[in-house]
Image (spheres, rainbow, N blue to C red):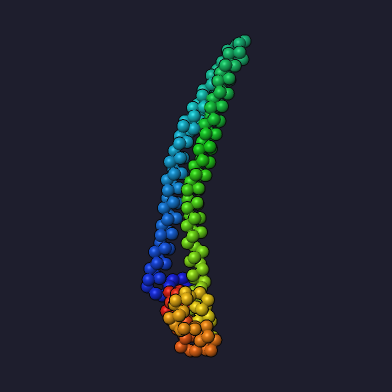
Amino acid sequence: MKIYADRPLRLCVQLLCDVLAIAWIALWVKAATALHEALSALARPGVLLEDAGEGLSTHMEAAAEAAREVPFVGEQLAEPFVSMGATGEDLSSAGVGFQQTVAELALTLSLAVAVLPAVAALGLWLPARIRWIRRASQARGLRRAPGGTGTRLLALRALTTAPVGALSRVHADPVDAWQRGDERVVAELAALELRRLGLRS
């Protein structure tokens, strides 16, 4: 498999594009991580609310237990403390819910920040790289084919993909020369196709 071109200019362009794509993705992943940390810090009030609710419930339960020890009126005295304990549980639940909401929001937004730019970069860069790798690997295989078959196929590919101006510089009628099997024209067309891909002829 051929991953990079042989010719320096094409090789530099490919390396630059690869580095830029990877740097772009890494930048957005880092931004998503920072955003997640910043949003997660917003859950602190929820933690304080949960702790306050738990503390209130614990103290009110203890007070209710102490009130129940009073003869004859213990249950009536305990009722306000039990009610306050239930309020503390509600506060604690609200704190937990707030923390869960913040955690979900932080995860959703950070994933969006990381994934969307990465998908955009991969959608633009990766198909072109894969297409070039496939074509270059095929061309390299054809170049090594015995009996001149590969050269003729490379020349045919040049006839179908190369610009008209480049073809006319090889021969006035390159199609006719290819059909007649003109070795010089076939070799130049094959070299043209290899150069177009950034490979050595």
The image position of residue 177, as x and y in percent, is 51, 86
Query: Relative to residue 110, is residue 200 depicted above or below?
Result: below
Asked where in the image residue 21 lies, by quadrant, the reply is bottom left
Residue toward you, 10 or 162? 162
Farthest residue in the front direction? 172
Residue toward you, 149 or 163? 163
On the question of residue 194 being in view, the answer is no
Residue toward you, 182 or 72? 182
Query: Relative to residue 26, is residue 59 depicted above or below?
Result: above
In the image, what residue occupies the spot 37% across and 71% down? 9
Query: Relative to residue 57, is residue 136 depicted above or below?
Result: below
The image position of residue 156, as x and y in percent, is 53, 80
The image position of residue 29, as x and y in percent, is 45, 51
- Number of callouts: 0
In the image, what residue occupies the spot 51% across and 36% down? 99
On the question of residue 155 being in view, the answer is yes
The image position of residue 139, as x and y in percent, is 50, 77
Q: Can you say which quadrant of the picture contains the C terminus?
A: bottom left
In the image, what residue occupies the spot 41% across and 75% down? 6
Farthest residue in the top direction? 72
Residue toward you, 49 or 3? 3
Query: Relative to residue 2, is residue 54 depicted above or below?
Result: above
In the image, what residue occupies the spot 49% across and 83% down? 174
